[in-house]
Amino acid sequence: MAGYDAIQGSLAVAVPRHAKPSFIAVGFMVMLGDAVRGIFFPTLWPLVSSFGGTRASQGVVVAAFSMGRVLVSPSYGAYSTKYGYRRVLTFAHGLIVVGALLYTRVWSIASLVCAQLILGLGCGTLGVTRAYFAESVPRDQRTVWLGRVTAAQYCGLTCTSLLGSLMARTGATLEHDASLAFLRISPLTFAAYAVFMGAVVALLLLRSPRFYDFVPADRAATVMEAREEGPEDDDRTHFRLVVVGLVLNIITKGAIGCYETLGVSYAQANLHLDGPAVGYYVAACGLGGVVLLLSFKRLGRLFDDVELILYGIGVMVLSCLLMVRKLSQDIVGDDDRDVDAFAAWLTAMVCMYGVGPTRCLKFTQAIASVFTQVTRSATRRSSGGSPGP
Amino acid sequence: MKQRPQGLLMGLFASAGSVARIVFPVCAGMAADAWGPDVVFATLAELLGATLFVLTWWRRAFRAAII
């Protein structure tokens, strides 16, 4: 009940009425961006192996998606600053439509890599969407809204694997329906149609007149003029903070990435759990993370942002230590080794997937705050000491 | 930092995370094959512990920047 109350409490936040539909639309795009990865979890390995691929091939397929994101994220960010958000998001979701259609018709490992790369290129908008919220949400409400965005992202990644499983079953049912032959339905690729539909919905939301678009560069024009006259000490401090934030982001995201690879195989090899069972546990932990993110308003009353970051990373350290078998046996005990090993693994998963997102959110918010503080201090200088917007 | 590159820097921030999601699992897989998963998780614990130390050391600057 505590979690339910927390969600109810967090929904009471007030934002300008005209902005809410746009926030919900962008939140949907954030969820779609990670759902593209999560929804294919249950069927990716069977699909790769059906083409004669190995685990290494699967690694390349997964990496192709991330590579697509890496390639476009900075460019999308720069273009959104210069030309506004609608144009960039429309282009990106157009790419998701193309990638999803290609995915429904993949015929080899190479074509699958190509589809994943295009989907990755389309899903590289996380920086853009976060910047959208950072630029348009009032500062005092940013924690709650970024919490919701991260919850949407996390929900897309962890909870849509269930949807992927359901789509695979539906695909198996419809596979031999002659009236749908033109769709070339396969249980292993049917989930791509859900991605296709999601991208089409996103495009319609972007074309809606209720979508609030703006060009950050125009807003910042006067601020930039003021900056040229101001001292550079703040710049250096903020630059160092940004670099530290980037390095820490790499380390913590990398740690979660390792869990996606080794956490599951560890359970299969050492605990003899099958793939779907591990998936259910991970999804349940992810759901806990989503609830935690949605209750950030209440958590924010108990701890400040820095404390949440520090505690989040501390819990991640504990998770890694529990995954070291020799240490976990000392920590949990070894009266009944199977049960204790399972308890240690499950605790580690809860720590990493259930609490890890708090760190992601707080880092994102920290970076957003550092960027906007540069602007705010410059605005104060330009307006003779009055506070910025 | 000469302009107001919120979108660009957020994009770089997201890219850094994606690079980590490519590099770390690949390296972790190779390390696990060579030395076992215990070494990987122990190394991750050390890296995250160092991260925790750096953040604790910088907490005042971070607090001033984000609150």
Image: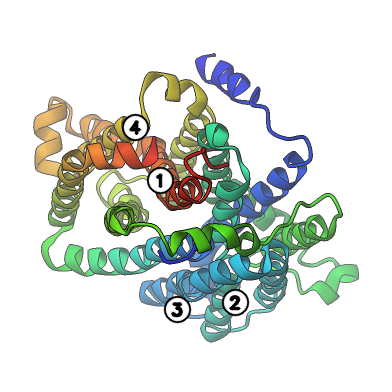
Earlier sequence position, callout 4 versus callout 2: 2
Residue marked by disc 3:
A53
Which of the two residues, A13 or A70, is positioned nearer the viewer here? A13
> In which quadrant is the C terminus of chain A drawn?
top right
**Which one is nearer the viewer's eye here, B19 or A260?**
B19
Q: Mark 2 points at which residue?
A: A118
**Pointer 4 residue:** A308
The secondary element bearing badge 2 is classed as helix
Q: Is mark 1 on a helix, strand or loop?
A: helix
Same-chain check, marks 4 and 2: yes
* Residue drawn at x 68%, y 27% as measured from the top left: A14
Name the subunit of mark 2: A
Distance of label 2 from label 1 (alpha carbons): 25 Å
Residue A51 sits above or below residue B26 on the image: below
Specify few, some or many for label 4: CA neighbours under 10 Å numbering under 14, 14-19, or 20 or more: many
The answer as to whether the residues below labels 2 and 3 share one chain is yes
Disc 3 versus disc 1: nearer the observer: 1
- In the image shown, does A234 or A266 lie closer to the viewer? A234
What's the CA distance linking mark 3 and mark 1? 33 Å
Q: Are discs 4 and 2 less than 8 Å apart at CB?
A: no
Identity, as a three-letter code, of the amino acid under mark 1: Cys
Residue underneath mark 1: A360
